[in-house]
Image (tube, rainbow, N blue to C red):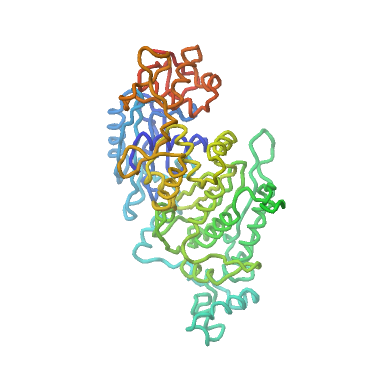
């Protein structure tokens, strides 16, 4: 993604919602000098599968407001100098200075090192990015990076390793019988005896011991031999001063189908449901997030978790947590042979971390007859599509090379105010999630092009995005403008207002011939509020009845036209505005 002002705005909006940095984004105030620990962050980003983004000149403590850096050229040069002199091997950097009405923000893209060059070390220590912090890598973390490097050439098959002391007697009879019946749908296995089929599918070795994949998928009690195959789930309580930190803590065991089934039951029971009327007038219970997204996220974690000695050998298990903000699923081991952008794109992408386990899982069912996996590599795309169709915020997926985290957000992506506005604007039409987001961006004067929207709402294809946007145009809810190929879209013309000439009212509007001087539709009302004495964003929003976001965009437009002056840092709650 190109480092632009629009991209920075989108990143900061996302961070404000999340209320903190992310695994691949770090924000620093850095008004006059670089943070002391900047080298550790660069090391950690270089060790990430897809690198990371560093933003300097933004104050996280003030709701990610733009605070700016005093000397962006010196900051950029300092970043490069620190990287070259203290990080070994140094990763490639891409720097860009973004200007906000005279305030500079420096963005630095840190590229991931090639697998053979990892880990990057800062002052001799290799760092790992977890949540929003940088941590010194443990020996097992470093070894996992080394294993990843070997996998590029040797493809170590941990799921095919034998489990000493096991035999076919350790398999669950009912699960194994049902599995064999489905596996024999393949002509080559149809006439073979049970043990031969089990050996052909890498469930039993030629020495009659179970493989890791076989024990995990079909064993009576896999956790007896491999305790790390258990799953821990808990509800995290808010830190409100009480002593309790979690509730409903459970440790799950059993073979793969049982794990998935029981984890789904626990997760659904600990999320909330609402009652809504169907078209026939009957009430139904609707879970706060789609069950198919939950199922895919849990199944992916179970099937694609790392099964090597650096995770299973050290007791690292799949973890599920429910907080007031999100359902979080953590799986040991990162992606192998794929990147996050590939698994979230509309193009087919399928690489199994555990090939034998993946093959076995395609013929496994839970007690309700549902597949464990479809086997088409579309699990992540289903998570993204189903949450989008349910009007939830886009799930956050992160991979730091040693663990994969899926965070499914609770609560609607739209505020009650936005929902009411959309209902009125749609005039009875049923809008898709993308259409709703575009309508809100148009309302707030945030034009987006089709490629940016496709990326933001992947796995939506360009064709799907174009069709949904064209539908808004046909309904006269949106108009195309700027580029001749209609790649850039903006709000309807009647949503804009123009500046008056010098003989008209005091609210600023441009002459009709001066299209470059157009103001957004809310600018005159905001200008009047400022002229009448309202000076802060909160006071202006209250006076005009606009949302905070609408107010900020109108203020930016008035500043760009030099119609108002800003006193204080951009984004600060105490910043004042007055007519120029």
Q: Which residue is drawn at 28% across and 38% down?
A: 85
Q: Is residue 391 left or right of residue 71?
A: right
Between 342 and 506, the residue placed more toward the observer is: 506
Q: Is residue 175 visible?
A: yes
- On the image, which quarter does residue 94 sit in? top left
Q: Which residue is drawn at 67% across and 51% down?
A: 278
Residue 416: percent from the left, percent from the top? 60, 35
Residue 342: percent from the left, percent from the top? 40, 55
Between 111 and 377, the residue placed more toward the observer is: 377
Residue 567: percent from the left, percent from the top? 42, 15
The N terminus - image quarter: top left
Above or below 56: residue 118: below
Between 400 and 267, the residue placed more toward the observer is: 267
Q: How many labels does the image show?
A: 0
Residue 497: percent from the left, percent from the top? 42, 25
Above or below 187: residue 148: above
Q: In this view, does 210 lie to the left or right of 398?
A: right
Above or below 434: residue 295: below
The C terminus - image quarter: top left
Between 124 and 223, the residue placed more toward the observer is: 223
- On the image, which quarter does residue 445 sit in? top left
Above or below 138: residue 497: above
Q: Can residue 224 be seen in this view?
A: no
Q: Which residue is drawn at 48% across and 44% down?
A: 435
Work out which residue is located at the far right of the displayed protein and give it.
282
């Amino acid at each position: 993604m190109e480092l632009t002002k629009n991209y920075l705005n989108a990143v900061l909006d996302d961070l404000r919602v999340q209320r903190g940095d992310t695994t691949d984004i770090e924000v620093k105030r850095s008004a006059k000098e670089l943070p002391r620990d900047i080298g550790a962050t660069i090391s950690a980003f270089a060790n990430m599968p897809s690198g990371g983004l560093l933003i300097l000149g933004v104050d996280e403590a003030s709701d990610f407001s733009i605070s700016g850096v005093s000397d962006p050229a010196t900051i950029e040069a300092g970043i490069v100098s620190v990287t070259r002199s203290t990080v070994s091997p140094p990763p490639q950097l891409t720097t860009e200075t973004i200007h906000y009405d005279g305030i500079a923000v420096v963005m630095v893209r840190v590229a991931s090192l090639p697998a053979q060059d990892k880990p990057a070390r800062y002052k001799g220590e290799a760092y790992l990015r977890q949540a929003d912090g940088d941590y010194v890598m443990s020996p097992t973390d470093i070894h996992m990076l080394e294993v990843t490097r070997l996998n590029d050439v040797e493809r170590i098959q941990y799921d095919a390793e034998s489990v000493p002391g096991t035999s076919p007697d350790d398999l669950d009879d009912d699960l194994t019988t049902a599995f064999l019946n489905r596996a024999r749908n393949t002509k080559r296995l149809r006439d073979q005896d049970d043990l031969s089929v089990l050996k052909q599918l890498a469930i039993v070795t030629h020495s009659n011991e179970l493989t890791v994949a076989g024990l995990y998928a079909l064993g009576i009690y896999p956790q007896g031999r491999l305790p790390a195959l258990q799953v821990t789930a808990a509800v995290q309580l808010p830190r409100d001063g009480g002593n309790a930190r979690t509730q409903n803590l459970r440790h799950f065991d059993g073979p793969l189908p049982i794990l998935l089934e029981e984890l789904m039951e626990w997760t659904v029971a600990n999320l909330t449901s609402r009652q809504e009327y169907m078209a026939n007038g009957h009430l139904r219970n609707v879970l706060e997030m789609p069950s198919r997204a939950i199922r895919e996220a849990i199944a992916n974690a179970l099937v694609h978790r790392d099964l090597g000695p650096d995770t299973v050998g050290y007791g690292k298990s799949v973890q599920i947590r429910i907080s007031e903000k999100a359902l979080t699923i953590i799986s040991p081991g990162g992606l192998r042979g794929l990147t996050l952008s590939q698994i979230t794109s509309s193009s087919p992408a399928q690489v199994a971390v555990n090939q034998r386990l993946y093959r076995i899982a395609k013929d496994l069912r839970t007690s309700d007859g549902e597949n464990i996996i479809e086997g088409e590599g579309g699990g992540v795309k289903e998570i993204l599509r189903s949450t989008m169709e349910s009007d939830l915020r886009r799930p956050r997926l992160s991979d730091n090379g040693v663990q994969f985290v899926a965070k499914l957000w609770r609560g609607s992506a739209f505020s009650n105010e936005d929902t009411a506005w959309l209902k009125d604007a749609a005039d009875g039409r049923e809008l898709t999630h993308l259409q709703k987001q575009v309508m809100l961006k148009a309302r707030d004067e945030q034009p987006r092009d089709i490629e940016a929207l496709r990326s933001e709402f992947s796995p939506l294809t360009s064709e799907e995005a174009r069709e949904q946007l064209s539908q808004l145009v046909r309904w006269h809810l949106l108009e195309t403008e700027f580029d001749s190929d209609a790649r850039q879209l903006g709000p309807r013309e009647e949503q804009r207002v123009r500046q008056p000439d010098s003989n008209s009212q005091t609210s600023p509007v441009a002459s009709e011939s001066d299209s470059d001087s157009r103001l957004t539709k809310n600018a005159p009302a905001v200008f009047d509020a400022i002229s009448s004495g309202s000076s802060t964003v909160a006071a202006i929003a209250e006076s005009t009845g606009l949302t905070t976001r609408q107010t900020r965009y109108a203020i930016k437009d008035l500043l760009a036209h030099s119609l108002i002056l800003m006193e204080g840092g951009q984004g600060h709650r105490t910043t004042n505005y007055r007519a120029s």
